Amino acid sequence: MTTSGSYDFTGYQVLVIGGTRGEGHSIASSFAASGASVTVTGTMMLRSLYDIDLSAFDYESVNLARQESMDHLVGMVDQIDVLVLAAGCTLPYGISDDERAFLSGAARSGLLGPTFLTTRLRLKLGQSPALGGGCVVNTGSVRRWFELSSTPEAAHAELVDSTIRAGDNWAGLGVRVNSVAPPRRPPVPRQYGRSTAPTGGSRAAGGTLVRTAQQRTTDAVTDAVLFLASSSASRITGQTLRLS
């Protein structure tokens, strides 16, 4: 269970990139439950195409691998207090290793992906009246962009370094930048990876164990994101919270 009830985000305008499923949806739902006006993004053209209830949010379609798509989103944003980056890198099927490396390099240099979008929104974030200024929170999804052409360890180090740099560079604009890095999930042992329902009345369903662990991680990430966006963290920037 998350601690959304501990925070009051009434009046905040929150944009959750990738808020249509998984951690992103949990984060968006918790902000909305705490009083914020929340916009979520996904890659589908219409919210009705999703099999999850998005009625609590505004919806915009965006593709982080296309500059024109992100430019359109930026043009639609009027006020923003919190930007949460929770969308992984959705690549076309059958993409070559060279193309993956190009997209990864473009994301690192700020030409595509989360860095590009955050940079385009920095001035609007700097106009936020929230205590501590506008807030950017990266999640593990940003780390996955770096993993396109590097090891998980190197990708984590790059996330930490880029967060420090952004925190330093944007402090003068009144924008805080922090990250939440969830633990990397180890391979699931075969005996716990069962996807079929248990038989004979057994309650030891492997799939349930996996889902429970994933939900705990999702709840921990959500709690950390809300804390970093709150007034309690108004003096925190350039930090990466690595969850255990």
Image: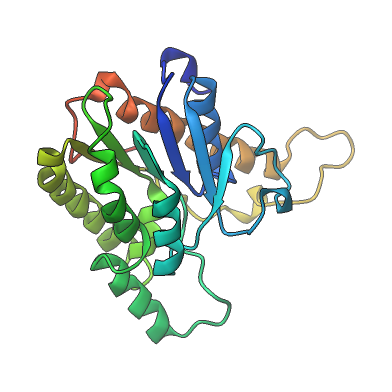
The residue at 57%/59% (across/down) is: 43
Residue 197 versus residue 111 in the image, above or below: above
Q: Quadrant of the C terminus?
A: top left
Q: Is residue 54 left or right of residue 18?
A: right
Q: Is residue 120 left or right of residue 86?
A: left
The residue at 30%/41% (across/down) is: 136
The answer to which quarter of the image holds residue 99 is: bottom left
Q: Is residue 64 left or right of residue 33?
A: left
Q: Quadrant of the N terminus?
A: top right
Q: Position of residue 225 (x, y in %)?
A: 38, 33
Regarding residue 182, the answer to whether it shows in the image is: no
Q: Between residue 201 and residue 137, name the one nearer to us.
A: 137
Q: Is residue 80 left or right of residue 219?
A: left
Q: How is the image coloured?
A: rainbow
Q: Position of residue 202 (x, y in %)?
A: 82, 35
Q: Between residue 13 and residue 49, name the one nearer to us.
A: 13
Q: Between residue 144 and residue 110, name the one nearer to us.
A: 110
Q: Position of residue 173 (x, y in %)?
A: 15, 40
Q: Between residue 190 and residue 93, name the one nearer to us.
A: 93
